[in-house]
Amino acid sequence: MTLSGRVAFVTGASQGIGRACALRLAASGATVAVAARNQEKLSELVQQIEASGGKAFAFSLDVVDEEQVKTVFKAAIGQLGKIDILINNAGITRDQLVMRMKRADWDSVINTNLTSAYLCIQPAIGSMLKQRWGRIINITSIFGQMGQAGQANYAASKAGLIGLTMAIAREVASRNITCNAVAPGFIETAMTSGFTNEFRQNALKMVPLGRVGTPEDVANAVAFLASEEASYITGHVLNVNGGMLMG
């Protein structure tokens, strides 16, 4: 599954799943634009990709800032010539029971996890339409499929990404552009590192494969959907959850 000659743009690339996706896409031959707020971590990632013989460029980006998104994507396309692959991965949590959830925490999660994907798709899709080839991959979550107590904002944002994925897939299919989602289950990342041992043990009991997933497990799925081999797959949600949710 070579991605040689392709240009990928990954949001939330400074750590976790986004970082793993950038490394995996670069290993497959893509030139990777990595974007996040943490410039220091992005620089380290670029150095790692280049040390392995890949090509990467860092862009400081707050995905909730509409004007900044427009500016950064224009700069990336200007510097790299195009964007073939867009990975909408940036995401946050602000967990609380819905009766106590502050409006600011609802808005922050919806804007970062869902609205940002819309903001990033708009400038990227123009490049894809011109070349009549593109891959849009949205990182959703198992909790966007089954819900989770204390995560009404997060679950709603991730469920919204699934609807967005299907709508975009229908809009651009005639131009040889696919839009899919990857739904991770229990993955070992900074976002899940704060879970208690009790929560972890209870979660593992729900996973038939009996282990926590890795960011690389998700990145491998993303790399497949970005490849030519996945050209007849669109509007699909690929579950990477160890069997935690089936059907």
Image (tube, rainbow, N blue to C red):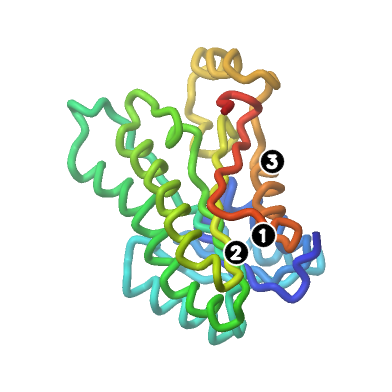
Say left or right for 28 vs 247.
Answer: right
User: Is residue 216 placed above or below 21 in the rendered structure?
Assistant: above
Say left or right for 9 vs 66.
Answer: right
Q: Amino acid at mark 3?
A: Asp
Query: Residue at the location (34% across, 61% down)?
Result: 64
Q: CA distance from mark 2 to mark 1?
A: 6 Å
Residue 63 on image: x %, y %: 39, 62
Q: Which one is nearer the viewer's eye here, 58 or 1?
A: 1
Q: Amino acid at mark 1?
A: Ala
Q: Which one is nearer the viewer's eye here, 201 or 246?
A: 246
Tell me the element at label 1.
helix
Residue 220 on image: x %, y %: 71, 48
Query: Residue at the location (19% across, 37% down)?
Result: 102
Query: Residue at the location (25% across, 42% down)?
Result: 106
Tell me the element at label 3.
helix
Mark 2 and mark 1 residues within 8 Å of each other at the beta carbon: yes
Question: Quarter of the image holding residue 1?
Answer: bottom right
Any mark on residue 217, and which? 3
Label tally: 3
Mark 2 and mark 3 residues within 8 Å of each other at the beta carbon: no
- Name the N-terminal-most of marks 2 and 3: 2
Q: Where is mark 2, residue-wise?
A: 135
- Name the N-terminal-most of marks 3 and 1: 3
Query: Residue at the location (49% across, 73% down)?
Result: 124
User: Is residue 130 placed above or below 10 in the rendered structure?
Assistant: below
Q: Where is mark 1, residue-wise?
A: 226
- Name the N-terminal-most of marks 2 and 1: 2
Q: CA distance from mark 3 to mark 1?
A: 15 Å
User: Is residue 195 placed above or below 48 in the rendered structure?
Assistant: above
